[in-house]
Amino acid sequence: MPKPKKARAIGFNHIALEVGDIDQALEFYGRLFEFTLRGRGKTAAFIDLGDQFLALQKGRRQAPDDGRHFGLVVDDKDAVRRALKAGGVKPLPGPFLDFLDPWGNRVEIVGYDNIQFT
């Protein structure tokens, strides 16, 4: 009997981050990155990231992330490094440019030249 055909995952549509306050989250991420605000409400905001988007949702209650993270591709990793420093955000120890946002979401900054797209 033939196996049923499986769908091939080809990418991400969005990532949802839980934050304590939508306005503060937009301000925090706006200090680090240029972005287009797709839309917002009282409990959520949507930031365009190329063909994907970042959904900020009010309501973070868990402890800060340790290993769980997402990699955000940027065109200028050094500009992010400078923005983190200017904002008083210390990168996490390790070989990558990782940081925690004010709500404990761990973000890894990946330079465009290091992406693994085919």
Image: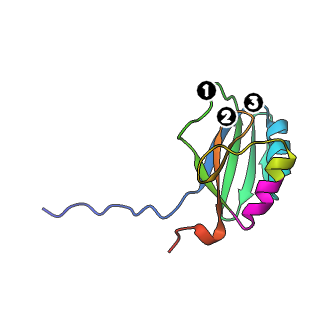
Residue at left offset 78%, top offset 42%: 89
Q: Quadrant of the N terminus?
A: bottom left
Judged from the image, the secondary structure of the residue bearing numbered disc 1 is: loop
Kindly indicate whether the residue at mark 2 contacts the one at mark 1 (C-beta within 8 angstroms): yes
Kind of residue sitting beneath label 3: Gly
* 101 w.r.t. 62: above or below: below
Report if residue 94 lies within the magenta region.
no
Residue 41 appears in the picture as rendered: no
Report the front residue among 20 and 57. 20
Disc 1 + disc 3, Cβ < 8 Å: no
Q: Magenta stretch: give its range.
A: 74-82
Residue 90 is drawn in which quadrant? top right
- Give amino acid for label 1: Ala
Report, in whole angstroms, how far the alpha carbon at label 1 lies from the one at label 3: 12 Å
Residue annotated with mark 3: 20
Q: Residues within 10 Å of mark 1 (few under 14, many from 20)?
A: few
Give the residue type that dot 2 points to. Answer: Gly
Identify the disc placed on residue 63: 1
| 81 part of magenta stretch | yes
Q: Is residue 32 left or right of residue 14?
A: right
Please provide percent x and percent y for residue 12: 55, 57
Report helix, strand or loop for mark 2: loop
**Which residue sits furthest left?**
1
- Mark closest to the chain's N terminus, 1 or 2: 1
Q: Which residue is mark 2?
A: 104
